[in-house]
Amino acid sequence: MKTIGTLFIFALTLASALRAELKLPAIISDHMVLQQKQPNPLWGWDTPGTKITVTFAGDQQTAIAGTDGKWSVKLAALPANAAPGTITVKGTTTRIIQDVLVGEVWMCSGQSNMQFKLSNDWNGDLEAANGNRPQIRLISVPMVGTQEPQNDFKGTWQTATPATARKFSAIGFLYGRYLHEVLGTKLPGHRPEDTGPNRFVLGIDQHCGVVVETNVASIVPIHFLRGPDDAQRRSRVRVRS
């Protein structure tokens, strides 16, 4: 019994040590954009009971990691700002998120219409050559078939350059560029992929799960770009044969 008890205590200690690290979801990372003029939730995971301090643009918010390790805070609303800022998150470790902008955040959802890359458009090379627009950012949620809600995904924010723009959603990039020129503020594109017909919010929920249900929906509640169906897309976009 003594040996079993020793092993049990060791296992608990080891499990605790493995969790003793601050973790952030993919969408909270370098080059991200916060929605202007509204509070923005940030969240992550750490050792249960750990105090978390989040600082950005003079605003400081704190939270305590729950029994499941999850924590969340809400940053104060800010106006659009072209000057990149830094988000500092302190817990058991410290994470620094670089090159953060405040502007317009749109969520683009669709099927093949949103997956259609700029490089596949008839004029894609010319459009990409004019793609040096570092204030336009995109993060893409990969298609992952699952019936269970997910709390994270694999992806990174990318700034628009002639090289990266080629891989952007054609609709997302061109629409984003137009709005950026008209509004003169930061406009990232957040592009979840949808695997089913006419499943706008449901499709987003399938791939982001808990992220969308509890957090992302609070970041981007009013801006959605839903692409036309495939027949409409073919009539509007010329594709290289």
Image (cartoon, rainbow, N blue to C red):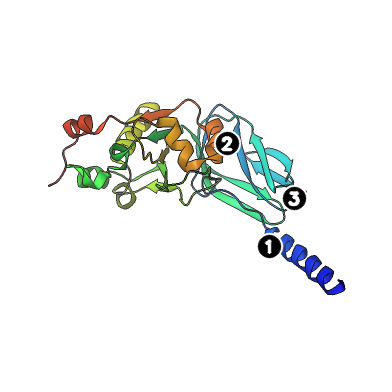
Q: Quadrant of residue 139?
A: top left
Neighbour class for label 3 at 10 Å: few (<14), some, many (≥20)?
some
* x and y percentages locating residue 74 in the rendered image: 65, 35
Q: Quadrant of residue 186?
A: top left
Q: Earlier in the sequence, mark 2 or mark 1?
A: 1
Outermost residue on the front side: it is: 1
Q: Residue at x 17, y 31 (%)?
A: 235
Closer to us: 24 or 105:
24
Number of callouts in the render?
3
* Secondary structure found at label 2: helix
Q: Quote the CA–CA distance across marks 2 and 1.
A: 25 Å
Q: Which mark is residue 215?
A: 2
Neighbour class for label 1 at 10 Å: few (<14), some, many (≥20)?
few
Please say if 126 is above or below 217: below
**Image position of 45 (left or right of 183):** right
Check the picture and name the quadrant holding the N terminus: bottom right
Q: Residue at x 41, y 29 (%)?
A: 224
**Image position of 153 (left or right of 226):** right
**Image position of 110 (left or right of 205):** left
* x and y percentages locating residue 41 in the rendered image: 61, 36
Q: Quote the CA–CA distance across marks 3 and 2.
A: 20 Å
Q: Amino acid at mark 3?
A: Pro
Residue occupied by mark 1: 18
Instruction: Using the rendered image of the protein, determine whether residue 79 is visible from the camera's viewpoint.
Output: yes
Residue occupied by mark 3: 48
Q: Earlier in the sequence, mark 3 or mark 1?
A: 1
Q: Amino acid at mark 1?
A: Leu
Q: Earlier in the sequence, mark 3 or mark 2?
A: 3
